[in-house]
Image (cartoon, rainbow, N blue to C red):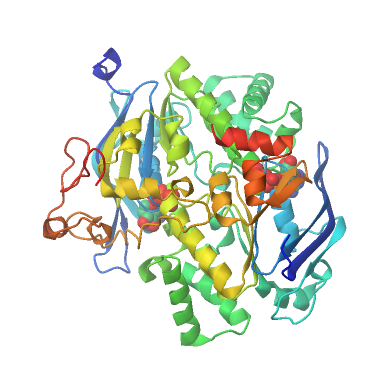
Amino acid sequence: MNARELRTPLLAVRDLAVHFDAPHSASGVARAVDGVGFEVGEGEVLALFGESGSGKSVTARAILGLVERPGRLVAGSIRFAGRELVGLAESDYRRVRGREIALVFQDPAAALNPVLTLGEQLCEAPRAHLGLTAAAARERATALLGELGFDGDSGWLARFPHQLSGGQRQRAALAQALLCEPKLVLADEPTTALDPTLVATVVELLRRRASERGTGVLWITHDLRVARSIASRAVVLYAGRVVETGPLAELSRSPRHPYTRALFDARPSATRRGSPLLAPQGSAGDPSAWPSGCRFHPRCPFADAACAAIEPALARGVACHHPLAEAGR
Amino acid sequence: MSSREPILVVEGLAKTYRTAAGPVEALRDVSFELARGERLAVVGESGSGKSTLVRALLALVRPDAGRVRLSPRGAGRMLEWSSLAGRELARARRYVQPVFQDPMASLNPRRPVIAAVEEPLVVHGLARGDAARARAIALCAEVGLEPATAARFPHELSLGQAQRACLARALASEPELLVLDEPTSALDVGLQAQIVNLLFASARARELALLFVSHDLDLVGHVAERVLVLERGRIVEAGAVEQVLDAPRHEHTRALVRAWQL
Ligand SMILES: Nc1ncnc2c1ncn2[C@@H]1O[C@H](COP(=O)(O)OP(=O)(O)OP(=O)(O)O)[C@@H](O)[C@H]1O
Ligand SMILES: Nc1ncnc2c1ncn2[C@@H]1O[C@H](COP(=O)(O)OP(=O)(O)OP(=O)(O)O)[C@@H](O)[C@H]1O
Ligand SMILES: [Mg+2]
Ligand SMILES: [Mg+2]
């Protein structure tokens, strides 16, 4: 164990639960995030995997104190640089948000204000948080846009979000999050709209921030291919629970949870061109009525009676009654 | 190119946007054809004009020059798609349906998503009342949306769930061409695989043509028969998928393929 692991982690999430009122369901409550825990060290990039609806974005929003009704943070602890964020007053949270922890929204449209030019919205935070002059803020914004692959001319700051392409908007949202050099970046699917060259550019930029400035990054994704080029460790969510965690290289070489393997096998590169993709069957279901026992059991080829009855605990990095052997099964 | 009849003929399309910082030429002299049931991918760097092309094909932006013709079986004749307007355009829209990158922007925030799937059935006179609702539920099931989930409002869904609803809506009017702008970038890989397989199956079964924009070259390799490569608004390479991805000729395509291999 090295010195970094012995220090207080930058972010430590424990037993986090975020539920939504679900008045139209029998149980009345949707358990979207239901006992999630992980840590992100200084300078570390942690990948958070999971299929659609598994609770990735809700987890990120909870860390930023952005859970709104009908959602509630019902349990858990979120410690950032040793300080508890759960229960923090909104006025204190506002000082953390954007300045110390920044969220790159999955939906760039949600991050950018449609009625302001890029210049107006990008320059606001560095002026407020870092006390930069208008000119210095513009210079900083232009430089960061340049690093993110916008060509040198200054016209970009005069554009409105709707005057940008999808990939340009996603990079503008990324710039907005990175501008104040936060200690922790929650990057929610930050490269989904980017061409391969730009994906490499963004990965490189964040890697540099992590190694040179100790920025911690939570890289939320379902793309193993890109995650492998940036993250060292990974956490896999399924139906609001952590089902597997460990070094990403190991996880991708020999996943232990059958769900992790199904997730990785569904990549188009895993099958021959033109043949049907290896799609996992069905869906996880609705968070107001998760399956009993192991929540993955109805879709799992290895499930037996125990799986339907008893929820497996996370032990040595995997929550499964019948983890796959090293070489797969 | 295949010898099949075309569903879409595009000739000399051009589009320039005006901005405070000057004009942006987004499309320049773009011409190509798409056969019935054919699967065509459009790739190219960010800002190369892919979404502008998509919007022009969906009659959502008016091109400055050029012509788009459409020949759906349902209409029984060639339509001057780029000059249709009003009721005629509204009626013909059932043959060409979009799926966009950002599902939240395509759904009405004040209505449950099942209503969005039902709407085209009613608007185009394909079903009414209980039959329309039942058909909408079946379409949702086809794309993996549980009825309880489909009954929720867009903001109550994850992005992937919302995108599934958009796909169900697009398939509802029994289109002959789907125009998809990075349709699966908001989806997890499992769902992407399910939807790609589904698209594939529908495309085969119904002779549904697909024109889709993607940055995922593995996905392009899987779905497309032919690929167009755009750079700064121009087609710089076009050909069979094996040729374009495995033996790219243009420098821009080579750069994309190289970066993909990371
Ligand atoms: N405001 C809300 N009201 C009710 N349910 C919600 C709300 N927001 C999210 N949920 C539910 O919480 C669950 C987790 O959603 P979340 O957005 O975290 O998924 P995700 O893992 O980010 O998925 P994706 O990959 O599709 O973005 C989903 O079932 C979603 O429908
Ligand atoms: N409404 C608009 N006003 C001004 N410029 C625009 C507008 N829409 C797009 N542009 C510009 O036109 C060019 C082409 O944009 P388009 O959205 O077609 O690109 P794209 O290939 O889809 O890119 P991406 O991969 O990033 O989505 C870009 O340089 C963009 O900034
Ligand atoms: Mg999400
Ligand atoms: Mg686009």
Which residue is pictured at 46% across the width and 86% down the height? B130
* In the displayed structure image, the side of residue A188 where residue B2 appears, left or right: right
* In the displayed structure image, the side of residue A106 where residue B61 appears, left or right: right
* In the displayed structure image, the side of residue A104 where residue A162 appears, left or right: right
Which residue is pictured at 44% across the width and 76% down the height? B138
User: Between residues A166 and B254, which one lies in front from this camera angle?
Assistant: B254
Residue found farthest to the top:
A3
Q: Residue A144 at x, y = what percent?
A: 62, 25
Residue B260 sits above or below residue B75 on the image: above
Which residue is pictured at 30% across the width and 49% down the height? A259
Quadrant location, the N terminus of chain B:
bottom right
Count all numbered tags in the image, as a single digit. Answer: 0
The reply to whether residue A210 is in sight is yes
User: Between residues A306 and B125, which one lies in front from this camera angle?
Assistant: A306
* In the displayed structure image, the side of residue A37 where residue B106 appears, left or right: right
Q: Residue A157 at x, y = what percent?
A: 71, 33
User: Between residues B155 and A287, which one lies in front from this camera angle?
Assistant: A287
> Which of the 4 quarters of the picture holds residue A235?
top left
> Which of the 4 quarters of the picture holds residue A153?
top right
Residue found farthest to the right:
B65
Q: Residue B105 at x, y = what percent?
A: 58, 56
Q: Residue A219 at x, y = what percent?
A: 42, 35
The reply to whether residue A58 is in sight is no
